[in-house]
Amino acid sequence: MTDDFCLTQVGADNLEIGLFRYELVPCEKFADANFSLYRMLGYATRRDFLKITLDDLFVNPAEKEIFLKILQRNKNIKLFEAGFKHRSGKSLCVSLTAACVFTKNRTECIEGIIQDISSKKSIQDSMLMERDFLKNLLDNIPDAVYFKDKNNRIMKVNKFYITGTGLREEEILGKTDFDFFPYEQAKQMLEDDNYVLHTGKPIVGKIEKTNLPNGDWNQVITTKIPMHDRLGRITGTMGITRDMTAHANLEAQRVSMMINALEVLGKALEMRDPYTFSHTRHVAGIAEEIARTLGWNEDRLLAIKLAGELHDLGKISIPLDILNKAGTLHDLEYSLIREHVKNCYNLIKDIKFPFPLAEIIYQHHERLDGSGYPRGLKGNNILVEARILAVSDVLEAMTHHRPYRAALGLKKACQELEEGKNIRYDSEIVDVAFKLIRKNGRKEFWIDS
């Protein structure tokens, strides 16, 4: 911003985000703010807002000190979260992105943006509560709970299961029942799992004897149910086994539990921005077909499909007037959109998956030659799943309508991938995508899939 720049210019007052300039010397004060900012914080006029200082806004004075210290050290700060006071007395959760600048007369200022992320934090808190609820539920159930994929390999177990085996979790995951039980017993378990997989019907309250690692036998009651993806397809089984040795004659108890922690995220994105949701579904379809053609197993296919469906989830925090803006984005707006990668990574990085889902998504805008973002990774430092997502994302985005331009078409998308082969994009993955396009009559193969 220059000295004569006014935040009422270039449509700044029409943005949903707050823009400001704050002078640090000779005394702290707001020098300018757009309409969105002072209305966000409950002030009727710009004049009223310019009478206050940051001390009047920060709920916690320590947060202001930290904010200023980071600014003084780095000269800029991104997405600093803090509590702000609304004029009405209530508190808002805001995100500050700012930089230290000097005016022509060498006045030191802070310029930046402020976003009200109260709704975002509420969604995050709800999702974290859901995640914690499910984790606590699983780990505190006095039953063995286990999840298997379509190949009957164990994907996840709860603490009770691990304690019962006497093994470490890493010694269990990826194995089958044949690694832990006598052959005939494991064979019966396999038949039960396949029945659930092939029919979609649960097995409820089956009483059976099971052999423990120490050689003892006990009587258990087992329930197995099919696990479905969001399209209703069976992806594996969930089992719950309760030790009924001391209660062999009790009436069988039904246990029903379904978990799909990520469904909440997908629904939130769909309700907020149907266009982005449609784009992510298509990208997931493209990525899954490419991976399938490469001969990947069901576990890796699940990883790439889930990564495709969630890769733009971080856009849930971007204001819709920027996300769906028609026309060229300003640098500040574009940098805000680029933050969606990190936003999504931070959102899911602490959720444990049998594959590096958060890292795959974090890398999907990286390019082989280091020209991508957010970390400028090169070559083999980029996960192959992320390289597939990069090709899939470009193919879908260029082929279809975007808010800021009309669809460029499949031919242009293929031209971009061809020109970027082995430079920005993995040549093997590009060749597979071209093969699938030719196989589908040189048309988009992912629309029907």
Image (spheres, grey):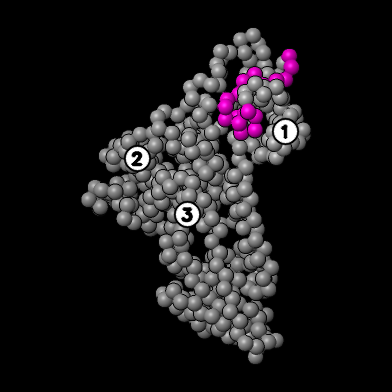
The x, y position of residue 183, in whole percent, is 52, 81
310 relative position to 208: left or right: left
Query: Local crowd at mark 1 within 10 Å, few (<14), some, or many (≥20)?
Result: many
| Nearer to me, 324 or 35 | 35
**Label drawn at residue 12:** none
Mark 3 or 1: the one toward you:
1
Q: Earlier in the sequence, mark 3 or mark 2?
A: 3
Q: Quadrant of the C terminus?
A: bottom left
Residue that numbered label 2 is attached to: 401
Q: Residue at x 63, y 15 (%)?
A: 102
Q: CA distance from mark 3 to mark 1?
A: 39 Å
* Magenta residues (range): 26-44
The amino acid sitting under disc 3 is Leu
405 is higher (above) or lower (below) than 278: above
Q: Secondary structure at mark 2?
A: loop
Q: Residue 137's image quarter?
A: bottom right
Residue 294 visible to the viewer = no
| Nearer to me, 37 or 170 | 37
